[in-house]
Image (spheres, grey):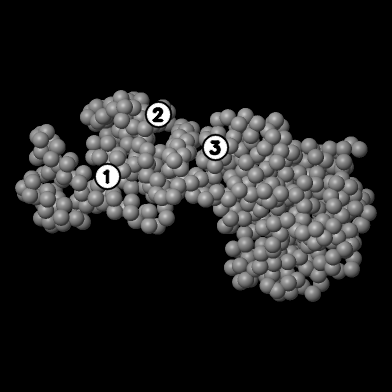
Amino acid sequence: METRIFQVKDPFEEDQALKEAAAILKKGGLVAFPTETVYGLGANGLDATAAARIFEAKERPQDNPLILHISMPSELDLYCKDIPVSARVLAEYFWPGPLTLVLRRRDLIPDVITAGLDTLAIRCPDHPVARALIRQAGVPLAAPSANRSGRPSPTRCSHVWEDMNGRIEGIVDGGDCKVGVESTVLDLTTSPPRLLRPGGVPLEALEDILGEVAVDEALLQQLKEGERPKAPGMKYRHYAPKAPVTVVCGAPADTAVWIFNRVDQKTGVLCFSEYAGCFPNAVVRAMGKSDDPAEQARMVFHALRSFDETNVTKIYAQCPDESGLGLAVSNRLKKAAGFHVEMVSPSLPHLTVFGITGGTGAGKTSALMVLAQMGACVIDCDAVYHTLLSESLEMRQALVKRFGDILDSSGGVDRKKLGRIVFDDPEALLALNELTHTFVTQEVERELEQAAQAGVPIAAIDAIALIESGLSKRCHRVVGVIAPEQLRVQRLMRREGIGEEYAILRIHAQKPDSFFRENCHAVLENTNDDLNAFSQTATALFVQLLNEIRKEERR
């Protein structure tokens, strides 16, 4: 069978490609088409013979029901009966959109579509090409995802071609799907309503409208032998690449460390983008940042499929947080793994402390942003110092006792007065540093204790004088951030609006790179202004250091 690809020029006008694709559907043929979620494999939803061909083309089990796609919400009554008010409210909010409702079906719906159940899964897709194709065909379209059964769902025309070339009559190319995971499936024939499949509409959005929504056990484990699924994707291993998948659940930093210890050249790693540089010996695919479930949803199926182009023999996948759209991504990954899941407890039994130091303009802030993304509490010693100057009576009294009249009219420290005293007197500057280090260290210790009590896994102490102050002894690892002088000069000029000569003077007044190489456990070199590249390098280093610390804790 020849499979044609139809290029739609304008779904809002008379389009020859859509007419030809619709003609195939009217004759009982199969045509894949884009929706906002994934590509669907469409057949006339009122023609049992045509719908049966879907199961053949996909090699899909007959007890796995199909979803009926309609072009307008008003068509709901044509195919469903006993429709509750809640269905109409949800349709008003979310249709067209990635929400499938399970309702009582009318008799004109063939049994093959519902797998013999008296319920029908139905939705109105939010894609102009999909709705235009349904209108041109003049019938609702029964359409599961347009992939071979068990394979990752297709989010691009090329994915459909890989699986369906020669099996179906046509593919309508509508570009990449914007959501990337299938629709949410909600059963409204039960009380309370039951979530059968998480998808493009988050559970929380449904709860905002309906109140209580039950979550079906099939989201957490495979259906038992003999159980009948009420919606697609509930029963069988699904969304899977050829190599076996293990889903690794836990805090991103901890799952990265867990995977780090288990990879080799034939291991595939599906990870959050910021951890992509952590596994140099593995075949790595990124699926978006850990805090961006929308990007994860768009990328997850494409990433899973891409492993089939490699020689990997196993795949580890970081599992996203299961709130919002993350629940859908997590569900798809666990289905791809056949619910083979590893739960990773926090790798360290107590607070892990990193010290971050380096000269002005080297890139400490960028390194600290990476640690913050890994769940770290960041303690800025410069901010602590300035807070103490304004709020600590004890510190002000100690400064006055040592340096005399340095207060302004409001009782605060006049930093200009203090500066004039210490900057021309090395002994006075040394005394100021010793005094302030004492107070800052005490406050840092207090904040570390608060973080530990709150169960924070990682803390990062940010201080230029981390080593000189003695705070480095409080850290499990000290990381020095260095950068070429010219880059530091340019960053200082850009950030603080100062001239080149003053920027150079400030940098020369600080410790040289050799000091950090000699006194830190590790050094991060920030050699250009590519923030993404530096962030990946920093993440890889911190994962490696966390792994070292964990091994030490076990001894």
Which residue in the protein does label 1 denote?
382
Kind of residue at disc 2: Glu
Q: Secondary structure at mark 2?
A: strand
Instruction: Identify which residue, 201 or 318, lies in the foreground.
Output: 318
Residue at the (28%, 45%) spot, across then down: 381
Q: Which is nearer the N-term, disc 2 or disc 1? A: 1
Residue at the (61%, 48%) spot, across then down: 342
Q: Which is nearer the N-term, disc 3 or disc 2? A: 3
Task: Give the quadrant of the C terminus.
Answer: top left
Residue 187: x and y, percent? 73, 66
Q: Which mark is residue 1?
A: none
Q: Which mark is residue 525?
A: 2
Alpha carbon distance from label 2 to label 1: 22 Å
Report which quarter residue 45 is drawn in. bottom right
Give the foreground label among 3 and 1. Answer: 3
Alpha carbon distance from label 3 to label 2: 22 Å
Q: Which is nearer the N-term, disc 3 or disc 1? A: 3
Kind of residue at disc 3: Phe
Q: Are marks 3 and 2 in contact (CB under 8 Å)?
A: no
Which class describes the residues within 10 Å of circle 2: few (<14), some (14-19), or many (20+)? some
Please say whether residue 427 is visible from this viewpoint. yes
Image height of 374 relative to 306, above or below: below
Task: Give the quadrant of the N terminus.
Answer: top right
Q: Are marks 3 and 1 in contact (CB under 8 Å)?
A: no
Instruction: Identify which residue, 531 or 13, lies in the foreground.
Output: 531
Residue 50: x and y, percent? 91, 52
Please say whether residue 98 is visible from this viewpoint. no
Kind of residue at disc 1: Asp
Residue 102: x and y, percent? 76, 65
Q: Which mark is residue 260?
A: 3
Give the foreground label among 3 and 2. Answer: 3
Alpha carbon distance from label 3 to label 1: 34 Å
